[in-house]
Amino acid sequence: MALMRCEFFSDVLGLSTSMTVILPESTTRQIGMSGERDSQPPPVLYLLHGLSDDDTTWSRRTSIERYAAGLGLAVVMPAVHHSFYTDEAHGLPFWTFLTEELPSVVQRFFRVSSAREDTFVAGLSMGGYGAMKWALREPWRFAAAASLSGALALAHPSESPDPDFTRLMDRVFGDRSTPGTDDDLLHLVRRADPSALPALFVACGTEDFLYPAARAFLAAAGDGGVEVTADIGPGDHDWDYWDAHIQDVLRWLPVRR
């Protein structure tokens, strides 16, 4: 696998930003590591980071490069700061960057497949929210989407015991209320056309503070007749859990071999 950090200018954001990218390569002499790559452009996984992280975190705290090698899978990990993958009310248009600019930049810079059946999205915590929002709002892009410990029941709180989080929500969403909008995953999954959606996967630990959000999302999916592969069991909001369960996600992805 080739691992690189790509620094580039975003016209949408109006500033320089970065993404970490893993690209598959065929290897025969690399000790302890196999690699798969055929003559076709490889499938691609957009892998989204959490609230306190950046584009390097998945590659620093898991073995995602090693896990993806046998699949011949490219992995694109963008940086979006504290944006909740949203066009911020008092900030920058990170949703537009993610959904419009980033895929076109990836296609220009790297030889990866653009076919829906070869395109996947996943993320943890805030990135789980971003992955599911992208898949539910633009289901034609993806064959599959996965959330690990996702903030899947996010709503703009009028009050919060954490003033820092309240300020963050005010900056991201301003005075607009999220329930019942396209930023509300429970609303999106209830009204979705199940036949049009990609395959969905939700994993969350029962000791995780976001476990109630996972249960709420699964219940809303049931209300909408949307099938979700659920992996609910012991685990907390930490990298031990995410390192283990991203492997489950990769085994679950319908990667064409």
Image (tube, rainbow, N blue to C red):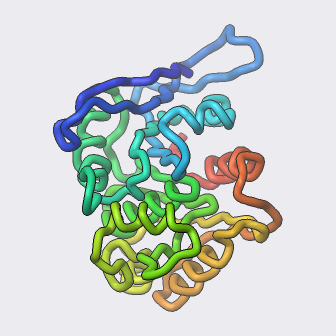
The residue positioned 29% from the left and 69% from the top of the image is 174
In which quadrant of the rendered view does residue 62 lie?
top right
Q: Position of residue 59 (x, y in %)?
A: 59, 32
- Side of 72 relative to 134 (left or right): right
Residue 31, relative to residue 89: is it above or below?
above
The residue positioned 58% from the left and 74% from the top of the image is 161
In the image, 183 versus 117, the foreground residue is 183
- Side of 181 relative to 4 (left or right): left
Residue found at the far top of this picture: 29
Q: Position of residue 104 (x, y in %)?
A: 24, 39
Question: In what quadrant of the picture does the C terminus appear?
Answer: top right
The residue positioned 31% from the left and 49% from the top of the image is 98
Q: Is residue 190 visible?
A: yes
- Side of 225 relative to 96 (left or right): right
Q: Position of residue 94 (x, y in %)?
A: 30, 51
Residue found at the far right of this picture: 234
Q: Position of residue 28 (x, y in %)?
A: 65, 12
Question: In what quadrant of the picture does the N terminus appear?
Answer: top right
In the image, 114 versus 3, the foreground residue is 3
In the image, 93 versus 248, the foreground residue is 93
- Side of 198 relative to 111 (left or right): right
In which quadrant of the rendered view does residue 209 lie?
bottom right
The residue positioned 35% from the left and 85% from the top of the image is 180
Residue found at the far front of this picture: 163
Q: Is residue 118 visible?
A: no
In the image, 218 versus 54, the foreground residue is 54
